[in-house]
Image (cartoon, rainbow, N blue to C red):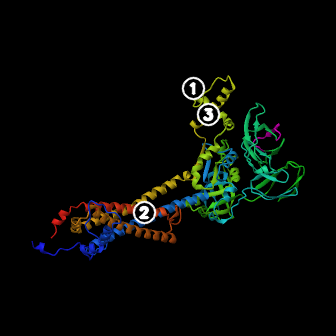
Amino acid sequence: MAASHRPRQGLAIGHASIEDSYTESKGSILVDRQTPRKGPRWFELMLAGRLLRSRRSVHLSLVTSMSIAGIALGVAALIVVLAVNTGFQAAFQDRILATYPHVVVMRRGVDLNDWREVVERVQKVSGVVVAAPATYDDMMLSAAAGRAGAIVRGVTPEVLGNLPPGALVQGKLVQTGEMPKFSWNDAVLSVKSGVAAARHAFVVTGPTVQVVPMLTIGAGVGTIEVFDTQGCSSAKNDERDQTGEFYLINPDTGDVVRRALRGHCRIDAHWEIGPGRWQMRWQDGAGVQQDTYIDLGNGGTALAVLDRARVVVLPGPDPELESAVAAVAVVNLTQVPVRLQTPEQVDQTVAEVSQWQAFSAQLPAIALGEGLAKRLQVHVGEEVRAVSPTRGMDRGTEASTSSSGRFRVSAILRTGFHDHDQRLALVDFHAAQRFLGRGDIARWVEIRVKDPILASSQTDAFRAALEPTDLGDLMLGAGELHKKLLEIQHGTVTGLELQPPNHAVAVVDNWISGVRAARSVRVRTGNVWRVIDWEEMNRNIFDAARMQKVAMSLFPFIIVLVAALNVVGTQAVVVHERARDIAILRAMGATRRSVAAIFLLQGLTVGILGTLLGLGVGGLCCLLLDAVGYPLDPQVYLISRLPVVVEPMSFVLAGGAAIVLAFAAAWYAAQRAASRAPVDALRRLD
């Protein structure tokens, strides 16, 4: 009873009583339960602020501070983790796009012997910057001080020209490949220098000179290379429109054994064929059928130059020529004699076809990765020897032996990937072909596009450019389609609906049905072309980076979750200590919604303060890490320094996750506070 005579304390929040608080609010403390409050909730905002500034309990203030610090720590850690993982992905992407093709086109199971046609087709796709053939082989490189395994890529000068400036550490990239240095004026062709073992033919078509690389294969397989001079002296030189076909025919049986599409001023075909006498048929510019015969010796090589209604045949170089010398020959298609000057033979007059002239030459160039050069202990200008155990194997001949050759280091490259720098070597495409002895084939065709991020969306366009799109293209592959149709002739062929050819419409319908069935067979028997973009080629790296990003992001997210749960504990302590105040508010007319809003605002404020503090600390840590450049072991992480890339989305994700968790925790605590019965609390008043 004595306790009932004690003076009642008002709702003391901070240093003010409940009466003072309501006096300051200048409004009625009684809330009409029937009339919903409209406008800003100044009453709840004021009391939530009083709770945050309360000095009644030091323990309560400490718990609130720890909740804010926990949320800030979790948000900061999450931002740093996201920035580092994004940096790894960006670093991998930049380095891959800098030195590797954006898209690769290859034929399933076999190499490309018709890579010229493939290059021509893919170049017509919108957005293509460079399309070029390439080889890719494992070799052993050795020098005076060491040896190491390497991946040797044979690339064209166009690919070397697209390497980023930062990739070159020392030396100079030889962007002319094996092309001999020469000058042409006043019917004088002066050869300045060449590359060892290279064989080139100069085709003189008037004011211009075309250089044709030739490959000697040997081993019982002959080669016929066809160069079409149509358009060499006109503006059509750059056009890609095809102007018909020409054929290689067996004169004994009359069977067509090879065919190719003609173009403007280019190498139209490079045929590997057995020795013997072969007939070549084509149409000249007037549409008149022309024939010529080519005698091919055992393992010989011949260059057939189509010049209007005639063919000029240049025999291949002597296989016994030393590999240390270069050789050139001239096909003169003009009426004016041409003087050929080489470094070792000053003057020779060429009326139509010259003999092969050999002269001393420099070693072919090779560019090494920085790590590979260190392993071999070589510098720019020094020699390395390459050994390949698979010479000629891709041609399917019996002469599958190892080969070795010397190269001179012309440049040292840095791709940024430790593994690539330890094994990468680049040589000229034709030098790789000649060294490997496979003939004129490529492993694949490399494509670089304007926007590599969209390369994956262009794979269908490249595949459509390679697959037959009209009846003429389908008929080129009629032999293979015929075999497939014979295999399934006892089954149902999709799209094949033949009608009795009793009138012209039925014949046309049968043709259309045949084309539809042929395309269906191609789809069901599998696409012969494989188009791979840079993301698919490096799927393992990017999948590992994504999994690492998810796994590492879980730990700071758990920190944020624990801090949010700490908000629940803080709210529980506040509710327990303010039980009497809550009861008085409820008894004076405050609704459950108002009480819940007070504690929800308090918890949400704690979450927002912690989130803002964490965003600032996380951004500052990212700036410091980027400025310091924390070193990494490149043998483990593939790159030498910690990459940090801060994206706005990282702040949005980290801040949004923290605020959502804090809101959920505060909402749960607020509902518990609002659900307390005021009578139970008032009964416990002293």
Q: Quadrant of the N terminus?
A: bottom left
Q: Residue 284: percent from the left, percent from the top?
A: 82, 40
Q: What's under tag 2, amino acid-wise? A: Ala
Instruction: Say whether disc 1 or disc 3 marks the residue closer to the N-terminus.
Output: 1
Task: Give the foreground label among 2 and 1.
Answer: 2
Task: Answer yes or no: is residue 220 visible.
Answer: no
Q: Residues within 10 Å of mark 1 (few under 14, many from 20)?
A: few
Spatial CA span between label 2 and label 1? 63 Å
**In this rendering, would 113 be left or right of 492?**
right
Circle 2 SS class: helix
Q: Which residue is mark 2?
A: 654
Of residues 478 and 403, the one nearer the viewer is 478
Q: Which mark is residue 68?
A: none
380 with respect to 637 (left or right): right
Rendered image quadrant of residue 94: bottom right
Task: Report the magenta residues as a range.
Answer: 285-302
Give me the residue at 12% from left, 72% from top.
Answer: 4
* In the depicted structure, whether residue 559 falls above or below residue 206: below
**Disc 3 marks which amino acid?**
Arg
In the picture, residue 579 is in which quadrant?
A: bottom left
The answer for how far apart the CA atoms under marks 3 and 2 are is 54 Å
221 above or below 640?
Answer: above
Q: Amino acid at mark 1?
A: His
Q: 685 or 94, which lies in front? A: 685
| Residue 658 visible in image | yes
Which residue is most to the left? 1
Residue 278 locus on image (x, y percent): 78, 37
Which numbered circle lies on residue 490? Answer: 1
Helix, strand or loop at label 1? It is loop
| First in residue order: circle 2 vs circle 1 | 1
Residue matched to label 3: 516
Q: Position of residue 223 (x, y in %)?
A: 74, 43
